[in-house]
Amino acid sequence: MPLPIALNDLWDLPAPQFMQTAHLLCQFQAENNPVYRAWIELSKQQIDQVDSPIKIPFLPISFFKNQEVYIGARPKTLFESSGTTQDIVSKHWVADTTIYEASFMHCFEQFYGHPKDYCIIGLLPSYLERKHSSLVYMVDKLIQVSGHEHSGFYLNEFDKLNQLLQQLAKTQTKIWFIGVSFALIDFSTAFPQQLKNAIVIETGGMKGRKEEMSKEELHTLLRNNLGVANIHSEYGMTELLSQAYSLGEGIFKCPPWMKVLVGEPEDPTQLKTKGRGIIHIIDLANIYSCCFIATQDMGELFEDGSFKVLGRADHSDRRGCSLLLV
């Protein structure tokens, strides 16, 4: 089926065209995505008068756990969220991985430059130990594009990783070092050092592995152990094809094709463009699933569109999510 937009226009989307593009995709998905269409009908929301982001119907993210959210025939590529064997994980069927690759490559270039400028290191043990991780897919592609002989994943090889970092420090090689939080804690505690030539990005991942700590405590520990001025963060999820990045202080910024709103905790359908509430994400790269996702995260949204993540919402499963259960 023909798309209402040209994909290449997304990556440098001018701010004034964002709403027009979002409206076109809202109509396209309401017509062609059975799950999104049913949610709009059952929740009695309207799309014929959508003229601002706060009027767009957002699909509760929990639907990715009990529904197959895609347009057209079932795609061949499946990304799954993390979880224990008892958990019901989210499943994101991705029709075109080239859209995902274009999204994270353009996002990387916007925030960090070209991957070839770095030795890219992934410390993602919990993600590497399971299949269908969108994060592993992204980092693997970045490693390939980097082309550096030492770019790669390091599972639990702390000694080997430490030796590599020391070697790269001597040659003043720029490092893009992304890791799951508990692994970064374990490594930096075992091998504290001064990574003056590195950008360190934590991507969350403490649940069920270590005693919970605040982001501020985590970043302070990592800054002290790794000798960097700031700890960066990546905000992404299985259900999205785009990421927001924080370059420090926990303040995230979105690429041009992604936007955050917040909903009132008592009634998440009441959306606003600043303040505290439940994070709602417009990800225009999610063309063949759903571009409009109501998450289960609490956040604070600022006037310039940047935001902070404050934690999980108390009522993680939004009321009404059982409407489409079969």
Image: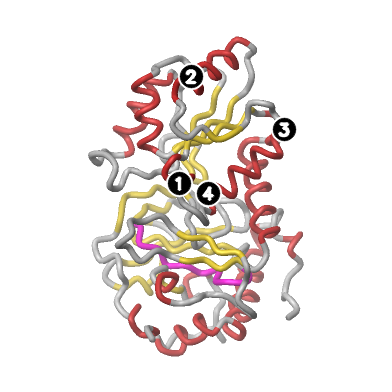
Mark 4–mark 1 distance (CA, rounded to whole Å) = 12 Å
Q: Residue at x 56, y 68 (%)?
A: 93
Q: Quadrant of residue 7?
A: bottom right
Residue 81 appears left or right of 172: left
The residue tagged 3 is: 147
Along the line of sight, the residue nearer the viewer: 63 or 256 = 63
Vertical placement of residue 189 versus 21, above or below: above
Q: CA distance from mark 2 to mark 3?
A: 20 Å
Q: CA distance from mark 4 to mark 2?
A: 23 Å
Residue at 34 percent across and 27 percent down: it is 220
What's the amino acid at mark 1?
Answer: Glu
Check if mark 3's residue and mark 4's residue have beta carbons within 8 Å.
Answer: no
Q: Which residue is mark 2?
A: 162
Q: Is residue 29 above or below residue 100?
A: below
Report the amino acid beneath label 3: Gly
Query: Can you say which quadrant of the picture contains the N terminus?
Result: bottom right
- Report how far apart the C-alphas of labels 1 and 2 lie in the structure: 21 Å
Q: What are the residue bounds of the magenta stretch?
A: 287-297
Label 3 vs label 4: CA separation? Answer: 19 Å
Q: Which mark is residue 129?
A: 1
- Identify the residue at horizontal 33%, vertical 56% (top origin): 84
Secondary element type, mark 2: helix
| Mark toward the start of the polypeptide (4 vs 1) | 1
- Which element carries disc 1, helix, strand or loop? loop
Labels 1 and 2: the sequence-earlier one? 1
Q: Residue at x 35, y 20 (%)?
A: 190
Mark 2 or mark 3: whose residue is earlier in sequence:
3
Pick the quarter of the image with the C terminus. Answer: bottom left
Residue 135's disc is 4
